Amino acid sequence: MSLVKTNDMFTLRHQDRLLPTGRPSHSCNPEGVTESIGRPVIFVCINGCYDLHLPTCHYEWTPDWGDLIRSGYWPASVNGDTLYSTDVFKSFEDLKTVAPGLSR
């Protein structure tokens, strides 16, 4: 959601946001690549939970498990509807190191 001002009035508008991922390894003309939204995913990171979309391009590319893991995401479900950022795991590990009794 974003706040948009039109005619001196503010309204909330839904915007589709792409999950930042590594791009495909095939070479193509950058001007010829058209990215669009793919399937929706729930993205959980240290700053919160976000509704995003996987990117797709007209070359029929969508990120696979390897692309997502290399980009710093970990699938939380078998079909990849929910993704965790690895910063969540790092923060949990840091918390266990600083206060080991709290992890029980």
Image (cartoon, grey):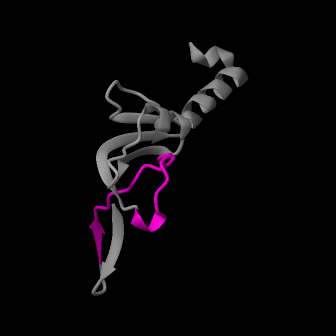
Q: Which residues are magenta?
A: 10-32
Question: For the point 43% across and 49% down, which residue is it?
Answer: 19
Q: Nearer the viewer, residue 82 or 79?
A: 79
Q: Quadrant of the N terminus?
A: bottom left
Q: Nearer the viewer, residue 37 or 12?
A: 37
Percent across and percent down for residue 63 are 41, 41
- Left or right, 31 with respect to 42, comes to right
- Left or right, 9 with respect to 102, comes to left
State the residue lying farthest toward the bottom: 7
Question: For the point 65% across and 14% down, which residue is it?
Answer: 101
Give the vertical position of 93 relative to 40 (above or below): above
Give the vertical position of 20 relative to 76 (above or below): below
Specify whether residue 84 is painted magenta: no
Percent across and percent down for residue 36 are 33, 57
- Left or right, 102 with respect to 11, comes to right
Specify whether residue 11 is painted magenta: yes
Give the vertical position of 103 relative to 84 (above or below): above
Question: For the point 32% across and 35% down, which residue is it?
Answer: 81
Question: For the point 40% across and 53% down, which residue is it?
Answer: 18
- Image mark count: 0
Helix, strand or loop: magenta stretch: loop
Q: Quadrant of the C terminus?
A: top right
Q: Which quadrant holds residue 89?
A: top right
